[in-house]
Every structure is written in structure tokens, then in C-alpha cells.
Image (cartoon, grey):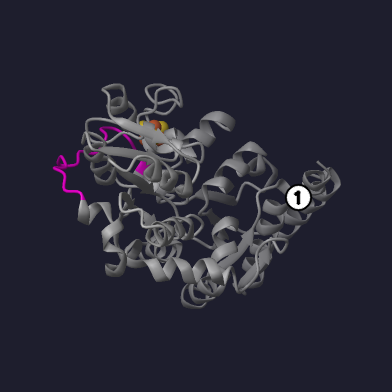
Amino acid sequence: MKYIDEYRDRALIKGLVAKINAESTKPVRLMEVCGSHTMAIQKFGIPALLPEHVELLSGPGCPVCVTDIGYVDHAVALARRSDVILTTFGDMIRVPGSTSTLQSVRGEGAAVQVVYSSMEALKIAENNPDKKVVFLGIGFETTSPTTAAAMQAARNRNIGNFFVLSAHKLMKPAMTALIDDGVKIDGYICPGHVSIVTGTAMYEEISAAYKVGCVVTGFEPVDVLQGIDLLISQFEAGKPGVEIAYKRLVTPAGNTKAWDLMWEVLEPCTANWRGIGDIPESGMAPRETYAEFDAARMIPVEIEAPQEVKGCMCGAVLRGTHRPTACPLFGTRCTPEDPVGACMVSHEGACAAFYRYAG
Ligand code: SF4
């Protein structure tokens, strides 16, 4: 508790809030690109502590939310095969596909198992040699090294019935695509977990090319406010740059071992992002040298034509152009108990965060 208390210290919070309110003089738009930040910002009521002209936007940082509907349909088709055990992190099973969810096909008898790690999925494969065990690889640079590690372990241990359906994504192409697409962003609240692996080199490139501030921060109120304070200081001075407000875990170099493993097993590919569309070189798929573990290559299935969920504004929410409360279905037809779109399903989704804390 002592550790947490330091980052929830009332005097520190009050000091930071006073400093931000004193130094911020003009409208500024800051975007967080991490679902955990979205949740922390709403949970701790950060927007209410800031001047009205400081706008906080939620971007495409929730890995479940940005996963496109075609991928969910692909996973559903795989789960429907009688020779497949489909393994997934829990959030994915309620995400709506075009006409079904993994939860509903599990109710129809499909073998869908929730796991807490890629290694747990590998263990299921080891224990079920007569089945093809497919792991849904979801997430950014935080989780893709763990998927890569499971694929490498499958090879080392001769587990030939382990497969990955990869929807892994890279953070930098999405951050630049939003600005290229005309979304006005004055500073990025950069993701703490991703940055532990990546380090800060990619933010240096973004900041230099787009003249936008990039500050990495953590998830407690003092962390978040420190990050916002640094971004506002940069903005007011007209000197955007890269800073780390999460030095207890993030270094400029990142975790090079995890980074190298990810690039050894996976390679960049064009990926479809919900609400943004195709972004070249923004996904991570198994390399040719690991093709035997690639579910997309090795397990043929018929996938239905994708149909977007009618009325859902997840796309606009993920691009930061609309708040969840602007969606006519928010809190009425769409709730965490009965979600219509992915942003309400995931515990890191912007719609779920607003519903819980700010709706
Ligand atoms: S409130 Fe529901 S329907 Fe509306 S954008 Fe969010 S997830 Fe989609």
C-alpha cells in the first residue's frame, strides 16, 4: 500500500493541479493511447481537475477495441471447427463479430477457453495433442513478445499443434496515422506498459516529425497529472519533446530482450484497425520461418463477410473525434452488461470507462 499511497498523495495531487491551472493559458488537446490510461483518467476524475480548455481525448489504445470485426469473425470460424480448442484472453469472448461472439459459439458447444497467458495456451496444446490449439494474439508491444515466446517454446518443445491467430499491433503507426488523418493532437500521453518494452526512440521520431509532445507516464493520479503537467509546459513554451514521467519502470532503451524476441518471430504487416481502417506496417504476423504456427496460414476456414454493428460509434471514439457520450446508444441500448460495441465490452474501453465513472 505504501507504494500506491506515494502516487495517490493528496498534497502532491493538489500541487500538480494548482501548477497545471496556473501555467495553462490556451486550448490544448492531449490524447492518451492506452486503455489503462483511459480507465485511470476517468476513475480518478482527472478531467474535472483541469482547466476547461485542456481537452483529454481517448485514442486507439485498447487492444480489444481496435481489433477489427473481420478478426472476430475469423476467430469464431476457427472455434466452430470440431478439431480446434480456441484460447483467448477473457475480454475477447464478448466482443461482437458480424453475427456472433465467441461466447455464443461456446454456448453452442465450441471449445473456447479463457487463458491468462500465451504459455497457458501452450500448456493446453501440450495436454491435448489430438486437437489444434489456437491462441488469439491480441495487443501491442506489451503482449506480442509473450506470444513470440510461446511460439519459440512450441518449436523448442516440438509442440506441433499450437497456433496463433495474430492481431498484434504496433503503436507508432497508429499514432502517426491519426495526425496524418487530420485529428488535431497537441500532445500524446504515451502508454506506460508499451514503453517498458519499446523505450522512447519511436516517440522521438514522432515528436520530431509532427512537432507534438510525447510524455510517457504511469497509471496512478500523480503519474497522470505529472504527464499532463509536462505536456502542458512543453505546449505553453512551444517546445514539444519527449519526456518520461514513469522512470520507475520505463527507460529510453526499453526491454531489448523482449523487443528482439518479438522481431525474431513476428514481422510487420498491414493491419485493419477498428475506426481507422488499414494502416500499412502496423500489425505483427508470424514470419515465414514460423509459418507452421500461424493459424491464418495453417487452418483453413470460411469467414463470413464482415458487417459493422449498426449505430455503434466505436470508430469515432477510437479516433478521438467523438466522446462515448455522443453515441446515441450509450447507456441505453449499450451498457457493460449488454454491450453493442467493443469499446463497451473491454474493461479498458473508453465507453466502459465513461459509463463506469463519467456517464
Ligand atoms: S456506446 Fe456502445 S454502441 Fe456506442 S460507441 Fe460505445 S461501444 Fe459502440
Q: At which x and y percent is residue 63?
A: 43, 48
Q: At which x and y percent is residue 330?
A: 42, 29
- Residue 312: in magenta span: yes
- Is 252 placed left or right of 271 in the picture? right
Of residues 37 and 255, the one nearer the viewer is 255
Residue occupying the point 26% across, 51% down: 295
Quadrant of residue 189 within the rendered picture: bottom right
How many marks overall? 1
Q: Is residue 72 visible?
A: yes
Q: At which x and y percent is residue 99?
A: 22, 31
Residue 196 vertical position relative to residue 329 in the rendered view, above or below: below
Furthest residue to the right? 11
Locate the N terminus by quadrant: top right
- Is 236 placed left or right of 257 in the picture? right
Write down which quadrant ligand 1 falls in: top left
Residue occupying the point 67% across, 52% down: 224
Residue occupying the point 26% across, 22% down: 108
Main SS of the magenta part reads: loop
Q: In the image, which residues are magenta?
A: 299-314
Residue 194 vertical position relative to residue 46 in the rendered view, above or below: below
Residue 117 vertical position relative to residue 28 in the rendered view, above or below: above
Q: Residues within 10 Å of mark 1 (few under 14, many from 20)?
A: many
Q: Is residue 280 visible?
A: no
Of residues 176 and 147, the one nearer the viewer is 147
- Tag 1: residue type? Val
For mark 1, what is the residue? 17
Residue occupying the point 44% across, 40% down: 89
Q: At which x and y percent is residue 105?
A: 27, 28
Quadrant of residue 297 within the rendered picture: bottom left
Q: Secondary structure at mark 1?
A: helix
- Is 39 placed left or right of 124 in the picture? right
